[in-house]
Image (cartoon, grey):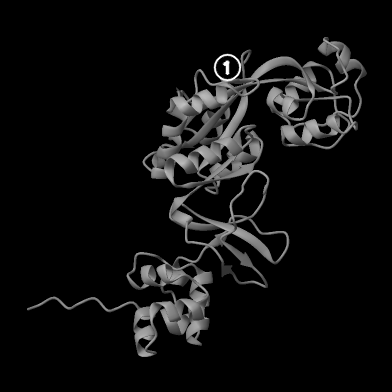
Amino acid sequence: MRDSLPAPHPVLTRRLANQWSQVELAGRAGISRAAVNAIEGERLLPSIATALALAAGFKCSVEELLGRGGTAEAHSPEWAWTPRVEPCRYWEAEIGGRRLLYPVEGISLNCIPPDGVWPHGFGCDVGAHTAETTLILSCWDPAAGLLATEYARASGFRLIVLSRGSSKALDLLIRGLVHIAGLHRTTQEQPNRNAEPVRLQLGGGYRLVRVAQWQEGLALAAHNQTRSTRSVARSARCRALREAGSAARECLDELRAHAPGRTRHSDTAVAEPVRDGWADADVCVQLAAEEAGLNFLPVHAETLDFCYSSASEHDPRIQALIRLLHSRSYRRLVGDLPGGDARRTGETIAA
């Protein structure tokens, strides 16, 4: 007795019933013909936004098209966190079998078009379906833009960087909202600071890989030729706060330069007020200071490590990032940046 053939995909069934080509359906739904082909061949799981677009093209409901609890319902994406405004542009990524939507942020850092727009409670895809080829990284890294560019060039995947300090990055990793978290508490004086929160908050099952070491210190106005960090710390005005527990905040404390201002989470945001004359000096990495045309007084070196779950180490997106960190070309790029040290980039760090 012959095995029965599997039923055709409901999108294919309805398209043929309407005597439409894939191109015609794609035009009616506002998606690509390649997406229609992949959905009908069951090589692509439609997002809820795509399911809504297809249903609108057929002039039916999603339930009528795919059935209640069907493909789109069972695997509909969810917000990584609630967007502050609507309409909201978003990126889509797959993490641990979940499809997550991320409100677009950091355009100067992430030169990546949005995957869709979410107005009035429902989504509308505008880009390609790249959830499975997207890596989400939450970290502070002065060379994050360079890393994302080299990652895309070497792997064909895309890297979206969410600019967060160590504590918030680790929290996102714990909640399963990012693939990788960046930690930057380790200094030459305290070489195991990045491993401590991993061991205490996550326990076993996580790996650390060295990214780079960055020279950190005081950014000064271009005309300020002072060479003493102590004298600058005593007399400078309008210093910015840094994240509690970060190496930058400890650098402020070490200089007894307690800041009266609001917390700033990036070195660029710290250097700009000095460049524009709103502050005399602030703590940041040498790269940010020199890019802003400022003088720089070194205090200590700060180390950035990436943390990820060992259960995801076979994910091709993570493997591609590890290969990049091991590559001689990327280490040379980082080592050539002001204040960058890539001699241990790519090393596994014991957690």
**Could you tell me which residue is drawn at 52 percent across and 29 percent down?**
199
Query: Image quarter for residue 298?
Result: top right
Horizontally, residue 112 falls left or right of residue 66, namely right
Residues 300 and 200: in front is 300
Outermost residue, bottom side: 18
Query: Image quarter for residue 147?
Result: top right
Residues 223 and 340: in front is 223
Horizontally, residue 313 falls left or right of residue 137, namely left
Residue under circle 1?
191
- Horizontal and vertical percent position of residue 206: 46, 34
**Could you tell me which residue is drawn at 82 percent across and 13 percent down?**
229
Query: Is residue 290 positioned above or below 100 on the image?
Result: above
State how many labels appear. Answer: 1
Residue 204: tell me if it is visible.
Answer: no
Disc 1 marks a residue whose amino acid type is: Pro
Residues 110 and 313: in front is 110
Residue 333: tell me if it is visible.
Answer: yes
Which element carries disc 1, helix, strand or loop? loop
Few, some or many C-alpha atoms within 10 Å of disc 1 (few <14, some 14-19, many ≥20)?
few
- Horizontal and vertical percent position of residue 91: 57, 56
